[in-house]
Image (cartoon, rainbow, N blue to C red):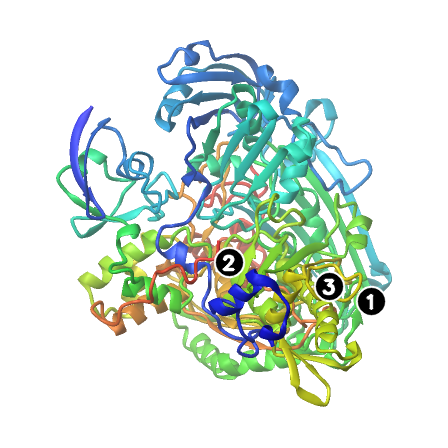
Amino acid sequence: MTEELDAGVIAEQIAESGQLGGPGGGREVGQARRRKEDARLLTGQTRWTDNIALPGLLHIALVRSPIAHARVTRVDVAAARQRPGVLAAFTGADLAAELGTLPCAWPVTADMVHPDHRPLATDEVRHVGEAVAVVVARDRYAAADALEAVEVDYEPLPVVTDMTEALRDEVLVHADKGTNKTFLWPFDGGDYDAARAKADVVVSRRYIQQRLIPAAMEPRAVVVEPIASAGEYTVYSATQIPHILRIMLALTTGIAEQKIRVIAPDVGGGFGSKLNVYAEEVIALVVAKRLGRPVKWTESRSEGFQATIHGRDQIQDIEIAATRDGTILGVSVDLKADMGAYLQLVTPGVPILGAFMYNAIYKMEGYRFRCTGVFTNKTPTDAYRGAGRPEATYAIERIVTELAVELGMDPIELRRKNWIRHEEFPYTTVAGLTYDSGNYEAATGKALGLFGYDELRAEQARRRESGDPVQLGIGISTFTEMCGLAPSRVLGSLSYGAGGWEAASIRMLPTGKVEVVTGTSPHGQGHETAWSQIAADALGVPFDDVTVIHGDTQSAPVGMDTYGSRSLVVGGVAVHLAAQKVVGKARAIAAHLLEAAESDIEFAGGVFSVKGSPEARSTIQEIALATFAAHNLPDGMEPTLNSDAVLDPENFSFPHGTHLCAVDVDTETGAVTIRKYVAVDDVGKVVNPLIVEGQVHGGIAQGIGQALYEEAVYDPDGNLITGTMVDYLVPAASDLPEFTTDRTETPATSNPLGVKGVGEAGTIASTPAVVSAVVDALRPFGVDDVQMPCSPERVWRAVHGAGGAAGAGRAAQGTVAYGGPQTATTAGGAE
Amino acid sequence: MARIDVTVDGVRYTDEVEPRLLLVHYLRDRLGKVGTPVGCDTSNCGACTVHLDGVSVKSCAVLAVQADGAAVTTIEGLASDGRLHPVQQAFHDQHGLQCGYCTPGMVMAAVDLLAANPDPTDEEIRHGLEGNLCRCTGYQNIVRAVRAAADAGLAGPAGSELAGSEATR
């Protein structure tokens, strides 16, 4: 019908050029589309922050404290300034007024202790790696050389690295605060004491969530390009949160928000570690402002291990109460969470996110949660993949298995008896959340079949009977989690500093092509591909005709960024909603052009047609072209189809699944080999099964990393012993098994696409499955815990320490020797 | 300063370099060949893997002066005639990458692995790539990709055209 339009010469040229797209080829959502992102990533044409080269670019390097706690009595940068190629060097005092103090956006209680956190320390350092001075040079080698010329005098202060010791308040991290206790956050659901009073069986355990290092493959980096005369700054940062960073940089430095543009170029993984506002981002901005020259800072890996946030680091005292027939009555948790030396962006909120997850998929009457935040002389903790929920899921899944042992029940049977049945959804839990949908029976049934549960149990019995030195263990994790952060009102009730909405815009170009502008900020998740699929379906255009724009506060100005498995369930759904608005506008114009009532216009597969006269039709691209020409629009109609949507979700997202792990444990060497790993995840409707499977694979790998390999170890003086990739064991291909993954599909009812989050599910699920399997293998030896990571030494000691009197085993497993190196097995926190 | 004569992705360069300059920094900072990233400072992660006279090396563990007289191939020089190398194509087809930061090194290591062992078992692939760390994929699809490339044969069907059809930004 284009030729019938009075659309002007440009429109005619477009129509004749062959560029005007046709209807899309059918349903994109659900297809295993290969990713649009891959082309540049596979060919080295990526734009990592450290790749950015600008005329006159200077390089920043930071002098960092080698001492965990000290008064800084002198910082002298004069000699560094004389080094060849050095343009400037600054102490913390030099820049104090401009640098401000780093933000914490989650004051979980009104009386939370919130110390200042200066980007460059001025008078005291509180963890190894805290920066005290900055040098600026013409290249990265000259900057590194100049660090040696900075003289710093430290007067050592007492150090505390262990939470239990810190809570005695004998050694204070922040002397002026008078305590190391950051906050006490209590939460109750139902009446735990009443539930416990009815119990026949109460099982209590202490679990240690060791400290982890996120170790995204791309080290952090920041480049600041100033237009000094205009007072404008472009900040390129390897960040997950360009939008939040922009606001926070304005608040921290006093530079007006509209003068700062933040770009997250290609970002190489985050896992929460780039969900922050870091000292180096502020320092680079202030130095660029001072010098009027573009500057770059790129962390070395070992520097990043000290200067980028860590994860986990909690002590969990958990208790479960049940009747003899296996009905769970209640759960009580006393949690201690290590903040490290300062509060980063959401440090205090991480353990609080776990508060709603310890009841997991189980029905119960009473729930009690107490969380104490603790300062220590270590790198700050913050969100690491799962952020509070992996810890909660670990503790509850471990102790439910322990309860099954106590009751003499099969751990699957105990779970079946207590989980929320699929016909009971929506279900409001004892912790007050309403799970919208789920089917634990279906996921578990599928997983058991793939796993061969009964056969493996039979084999286990045979090998126990025969005294096989290599014992078989089976671990179970029937998990759910809350993600898709989040309903803004709920976040407000938890004292979170911002809302949980997400924005999307759809721009229909004159040639019928589509630009999707998203407020999410992907760093490996494949949003360019998945959002294209969502938009293609909603608009009825080809997948290849859609381009996704993200990660730049100038071109994608509205957003709340990517973390907490929120991008699809909030941001992806916002894309769908914006596309619906485009279709609504196009429908009105189609009705006008087709001379029909709007109520008679149907839209399917990218084509508007008139009910009852199928020959009267127009594609959405033709409508886009007619709208651009604007020669013949309804009276008062704006000549644009472009539409925005901002979605504030009505609920969290509750993906769930069943992960089963079989391990062979060599009781003579302590070696653990994962023999079989089955994961059946239910993430609702799936946009791209390839991406979902990839997220699950990677998540499981990180959870296995915690279970078997990874631990950030500090010595009693606060030195990070595992300070390089030589010592901190990020799993390699040879350390991991092949996973068997499958899905069940129970659509979410809280969004129109029926989708649930998937980014963290694998990590949340896998750690308890693996450790429970190790413990299960060692059960004949009287072992009921092995502290993570289950290294060969720890496993061997568990076996050989537990042979004697009951209870001796627990001490020998080192469950109490918190904070020590992996080899420490002394009980009682001996340091 | 030392004078080096090195060919990178088919282009010959003669440069004065500091003896301590790492090959990866020579590639990135002097030649602008930023397709090869740096992921660690202890030669553990393998992100910076390139080929030096056809053999994979971690370019953070090689001095630029050691590349004097040699030919270096980076991820930027792997595709030929405007088409992806079969290993690059297999990574795309099998979703063997997510954030993509390890990908240049992983692909270069995999090409070298297949040159030495054209038909590796999954176990051999996992051990052959243990010097290259990935934090996103759990390696499963990387193993699948290398397996698929092996099955296709390095001389097998060339990859899809590079001509920007999928470049989206």
Mark 2, mark 1: which one is toward the viewer? 1
Is residue A424 visible from the viewing direction of this image? Answer: yes
Say which quadrant the N terminus of chain A sits in.
bottom right
Where residue B70 appears, as percent x and y from the top left, is 15, 43
Compute the Cα span from label 2 to label 3.
31 Å
Image point (54%, 44%), residue name: A264
Q: Quadrant of residue A599?
A: bottom right
Quadrant in which the C terminus of chain A is drawn:
top right
- Give above or below for A182 relative to A320: above
- Relative vertical location of residue A438 with respect to residue A191 in this rendering, above or below: below
Q: Chain of mark 1?
A: A
Seen from the viewer's position, the closer of residues A9 and A738 is A9
Label 1 secondary element = loop
In the image, residue A288 above or below residue A192: above
Q: Which mark is residue A365?
A: 1
Nearest to the observer: residue A124 or residue A415: A124
Which of the 4 image quarters holds residue B38?
top left
**Residue A683 seen from this side:** no
**What residue is pinned by disc 3?**
A359
SS at circle 2: loop
Q: Is residue A104 left or right of residue A67?
A: right
Spatial CA span between label 2 and label 1: 35 Å
Q: Mark 2 sits on what residue?
A: A802
B122 sits to left or right of A14: left
A172 to B112, vertically: above or below: above
Q: Residues within 10 Å of mark 3 (few under 14, many from 20)?
A: many
Do callouts 3 and 1 mark residues in contact (Cβ within 8 Å)?
Answer: no
Chain-order first, disc 2 or disc 1: 1
Three-letter residue code for mark 3: Asn
